[in-house]
Amino acid sequence: QVQLIESGGGLVQAGGSLRLSCAASGRAFSNTVMAWFRHVPGKEREFVAGIRSIDVPYYTDSVKGRFKISINNAKNSVHLQMNSLKPEDTAVYYCAAKWGLLETPRLGIGEEYEYWGQGTQVTVSS
């Protein structure tokens, strides 16, 4: 049974930083795709960033240059460093995982992922 546990959310002022972490248990990282999505009530879930075990990271345009996703295969974890946060970054952030191949154009499709965390709230005040 795979479980994804997120941590690191909270309240921060605009311009501040937060670091989200996602720890996976129940299955070792191997040919794994990890991603972060976010959701605001009333809006569709949005892809934020994704990374494969041995590959370059991918970001949605609105976070490029501000967010950085990293993966630690030895610790079965993925992190999202969020800098220069803006009020529009406010959302519940979810970690997602898929074991197996996933083509780059499909990294941002939530239905491709097998496992999801419970979500962590990020609130950025203006």
Image: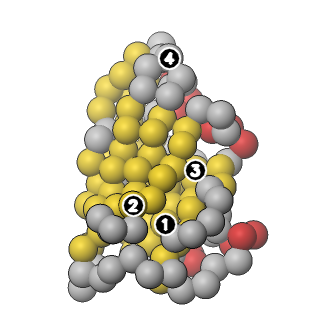
Does dot 3 land on a helix, a strand or a loop? Answer: strand
Residue carrying label 4? 15
Say whether marks 4 and 1 touch (CB < 8 Å): no
Residue 48's tag is: 3
Of the image marks 2 and 4, the number of the one nearer the N terminus: 4
Could you say where residue 2 lies in the image, as x and y percent from the top left?
Answer: 28, 80
> Splitting the image into 4 quarters, where does residue 65 fall?
top right
Could you say where residue 85 lies in the image, as x and y percent from the top left?
Answer: 51, 26
At horizontal 48% and vertical 35% (from top left) the residue drawn is: 82
Does dot 1 land on a helix, a strand or a loop? Answer: strand
Q: Nearer the viewer, mark 1 or mark 3?
A: 1
Residue carrying label 1? 34
Residue 72's tag is: 2
Measure how far apart labels 1 and 3 are at the Cα level.
11 Å
Q: Nearer the viewer, residue 42 or 113?
A: 113
At horizontal 52% and vertical 70% (from top left) the residue drawn is: 53
Could you say where residue 50 lies in the image, as x and y percent from the top left?
Answer: 57, 59
Could you say where residue 91 lies in the image, as x and y percent from the top left?
Answer: 45, 40
Q: Residues within 10 Å of mark 2 (few under 14, many from 20)?
A: few
